[in-house]
């Protein structure tokens, strides 16, 4: 099975000039924990912002969520997968890097998002998902 079979296609994105408040509101409204950040010119992936980034890199430092941009706190050099990646390989990437969500990209553009939850719901992946959960949770501050 491939990532394209289980990913969320056409995920919500924000541009680098969006505010942290806009990101938090979008996450809350759509019950999501991460948003890929793209540039406004050609929609290339520039980074990712998570609910955890908002807490640790903005709120805890007393930054103003109305004026702080996502570019100021996002994670850059994001680990991604391609739609053709296998679910097994993608779960290994998540476990190795201790991340729960990965943007799915083609030619630098975000075409989907895949989460550990998506992988856990794929019927063929119970063992891999269990191993990934253990690896991610072990000694993880996330």
Image (cartoon, helix red, strand yellow):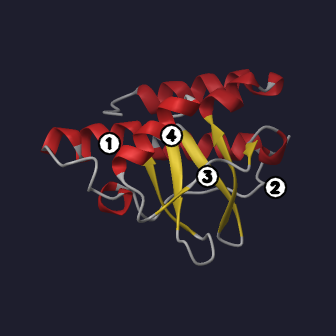
Sequence order check, earlier mark of 4 and 2: 4
Q: Nearer the viewer, mark 4 or mark 2?
A: 4
Q: Which mark is residue 54?
A: 1
CB atoms at circles 4 and 3 under 8 Å apart? no
Secondary structure, mark 1, is helix
The residue at the far bottom in this view is 41
Q: Which residue is mark 2?
A: 84
Q: Which residue is mark 3?
A: 103
* Distance of label 3 from label 1 (alpha carbons): 18 Å
How packed is label 4: few (under 14 Cα within 10 Å), some, or many (20 or more)?
some
Q: Nearer the viewer, mark 4 or mark 3?
A: 4
- Say if 108 sits above or below 63 in the image: below
**Residue 23 location, x and y as percent?**
44, 46
Q: Nearer the viewer, mark 1 or mark 2?
A: 1
| Front-most of residues 24 and 49 | 24
How packed is label 2: few (under 14 Cα within 10 Å), some, or many (20 or more)?
few
């Amino acid at each position: 099975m491939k990532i394209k079979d289980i990913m969320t296609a056409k995920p919500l994105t924000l541009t680098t000039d969006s505010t942290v408040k806009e990101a938090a509101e979008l996450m809350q409204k759509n019950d999501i924990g991460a948003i890929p950040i793209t540039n406004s010119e050609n929609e290339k992936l520039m980074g990712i912002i998570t609910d955890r980034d908002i807490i640790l890199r903005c709120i805890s430092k007393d930054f103003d969520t109305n004026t702080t941009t996502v570019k100021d706190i996002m994670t850059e050099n994001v680990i991604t997968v391609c739609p053709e990646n296998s679910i097994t390989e993608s779960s290994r990437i998540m476990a190795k890097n201790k991340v729960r969500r990965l943007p799915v990209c083609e030619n630098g553009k975000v075409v989907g998002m895949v989460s550990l939850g998506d992988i856990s719901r794929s019927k063929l992946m119970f063992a891999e998902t269990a191993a990934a959960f253990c690896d991610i949770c072990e000694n993880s501050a996330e």
